[in-house]
Amino acid sequence: MSRKTVIIIFLLIPLVLISQEKSQQLGSAKRQLEQVRSEINQLQTELDQTEEKLESELSTAENLDKQINLVQKALTLLKKEISKKTVNIASINGQIDVLRKQITALQEVFSKQILFAYKHQRGKQLAWILGSESFHQAMIRYLYFSKMSEQARSYYDRLAQKKTDLSNLQVKLQTELTEQRSLAADKEKEQDELKTKQDTRENVINKITRNKTLLAKAIDEKRRNYKEIEKLIAGLERQKPERKLSMEDQTRWEKLTGNFVEHKGKLGWPVNGDVVHRFGNYRNPQLKTVLNNTGIDIRAEKGTEIRCVFPGVVSLITYMSGFGNTVIVDHNNGYYTVYTHMDEVLVSKFQFIESGEIIGAVGTSGSLEGAMLHFEIYGDNVPLNPLSWLKKM
């Protein structure tokens, strides 16, 4: 067998198209998008009813926070799907290029087979065989011609199959391109929706901060929710025996025993920014009231990455009035860190995360003072001053 024939046979290995697993992933993403949009519609219905009843702007702001969070989730899903489509399209284009080269190679070989058969067809074939100088040569010529004819049929069948594969790939490519354009249109629509809701929320927040009665209500609600965080952490401690971690994460978890307290004054900052409200009492300049801050508030640009300060397990992801999107991380031995006012949450419940790992982005959810991170540290369900635990800047 010639080297050229070996190369051609190698090129005839069937190409692998988009797997069933990827199709299932796409279906899962669509279901997630449908669920997110259903939740947005439900919140919008609640918001419309709230406006009809002329209820508090605080409820409106909270509702808008939740809708904004869901729209951002939808956008994240859409971006991931668009990225996957881009990879799929590149893969299919690559397969099409390979197929076209294979078809060109097959056409060249097949043409030679046809030309040979034409030159020695019927009488010419017989004359060519009978014109042999010996019986042995005649047999070799006969077997050679039979073999060439058989190869010609084989190349024809393979060529036809490759052309069918090419046609199928081109259809698949067109489908992927159509779906990608549809996803891009959905993404643009969601971005417009996000902008509208963010503008509406900003107007509501401005109304609250200009109205002393509404502002007092908001501060009272935040004061209550400082205590609510303590209750949540107490509940998480009670539920810890029921928590199920993988064997790998359980091993990593056990290694944390006694480590958090040894890193007092050495923890990395969760976000780069300026501390605008320190731990303990601070006075609201508009209402002249005092609020006991159980953490610190760090001013940072919206979208700034928030990082976990120490290894641990994400124990809770929730939305809290006055705090917005909230993540609580358990660091073992009764130590917890709390991250609130988040824009996006990029971790999952019961996920083990390392020190410095990104858990989300700074946002305005639950905040009346713009983009910031509210950060807390608890030990034995007692709020601790984060500035005593973080590295000196």
Image (tube, helix red, strand yellow):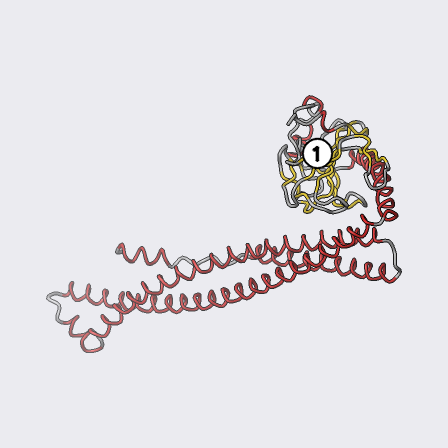
Q: Position of residue 307 (x, y in %)?
A: 64, 37
Is 377 placed left or right of 105 in the picture? right
Q: Give the quarter of the figure containing the N terminus.
A: bottom left
Q: Position of residue 172 (x, y in %)?
A: 50, 65
At 74% from the left and 33% from the top, the residue drawn is 296
Residue with the most extreme bottom position: 123
- Quarter of the figure with residue 223: top right
- Quarter of the figure with residue 216: top right
Q: Mark 1 points at which residue?
A: 275
Is 82 placed left or right of 7 in the picture? right
- Mark 1 residue type: Val
Q: Position of residue 330 (x, y in %)?
A: 73, 33
- Quarter of the figure with residue 313: top right
Q: Looking at the image, how many numbered discs can be counted on the residues?
A: 1
Within-10-Å neighbours for mark 1: few <14, some 14–19, many 20+: some
Which is more toward the observer, 260 or 340? 340
Q: Is residue 103 above or below residue 364?
A: below
